[in-house]
């Protein structure tokens, strides 16, 4: 299932259709209740996340774009699970520190599903760091090398690039009336280092 292109996406869709999504992947159906729109129905204040009204739709878009493999698929599935608990601040949608809360939730759910410790730790690392490449202000080689040294392995570095890239592709904005990926895609820059 995990090694087929769009395997996790198709699996999640079927499980949801049959009403058993939370039996297989606990917590994921809660993403349907986490809106990406402002209380007045507008898109978030940065005019992004127009791919769907909930975090669930965004997660599905990420799953359609993530590289194959069990760890990538699980990280893509649970990468925004923390948004459920970080949704509003001052009446506006904000997901501050959602990755930190998401790590705790993903660990809990993955343990419930009896995943091994290495898989759990790898998925936690990817979730905790999935915003890192999106938020880098300095894209100089020196800055990127400093970030890369923090990664435990090249394998996880490339998995993180895959997750960040899928997150970018799964996050749409409206610019000049057109839907376009909203976050900078810097994975190719980092891979060259």
Image (spheres, grey):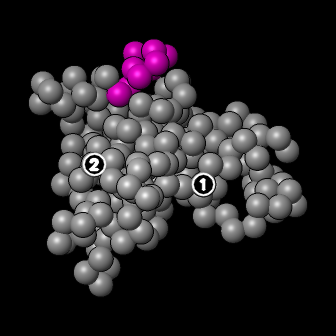
**Where on the picture, by quarter, is residue 63?**
top left
Coordinates of residue 93 in the picture (x, y in percent):
31, 71
Coordinates of residue 43 in the picture (x, y in percent):
29, 63
Magenta stretch prevailing secondary structure: loop
Quarter of the N terminus within the rendering: top left
Residue density around tag 2, few if under 14, some if 14–19, many if 20 or more, within 10 Å: some
**In front here: 169 or 2?**
169
Coordinates of residue 190 in the picture (x, y in percent):
76, 46
The Cα atoms of the two marked residues, 1 and 2, are separated by 20 Å
The range drawn in magenta is: 1-9
Q: Is residue 8 magenta?
A: yes
- Residue picked out by circle 2: 52
Q: Is residue 44 magenta?
A: no
Ranked by sequence position, the earlier of labels 1 and 2 is: 2
Residue in view at x 64 percent, y 42 percent? 161
> Is 30 situated left or right of 181 in this image?
left
């Amino acid at each position: 299932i995990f090694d087929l292109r769009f395997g996790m996406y198709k699996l999640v869709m079927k499980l949801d259709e049959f009403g058993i999504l939370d039996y297989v992947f606990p917590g994921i159906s809660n993403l349907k209740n986490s809106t990406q729109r402002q209380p007045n129905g507008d898109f978030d204040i940065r005019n992004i996340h127009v791919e769907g009204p909930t975090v669930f739709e965004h997660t599905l878009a990420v799953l359609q774009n993530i590289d194959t493999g069990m760890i990538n698929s699980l990280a893509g599935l649970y990468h925004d699970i923390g948004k459920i608990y970080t949704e509003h601040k001052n009446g506006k949608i904000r997901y501050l520190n959602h990755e930190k809360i998401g790590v705790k939730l993903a660990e809990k759910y993955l343990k419930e599903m009896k995943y091994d410790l290495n898989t759990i730790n790898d998925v936690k690392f990817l979730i905790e760091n999935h915003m890192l490449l999106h938020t880098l202000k300095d894209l100089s080689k020196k800055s990127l090398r400093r970030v890369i040294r923090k990664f435990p392995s090249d394998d996880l570095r490339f998995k993180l690039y895959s997750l960040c890239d899928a997150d970018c592709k799964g996050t749409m904005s409206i610019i000049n009336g057109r839907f376009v990926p909203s976050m900078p895609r810097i994975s190719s820059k980092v891979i060259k280092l």
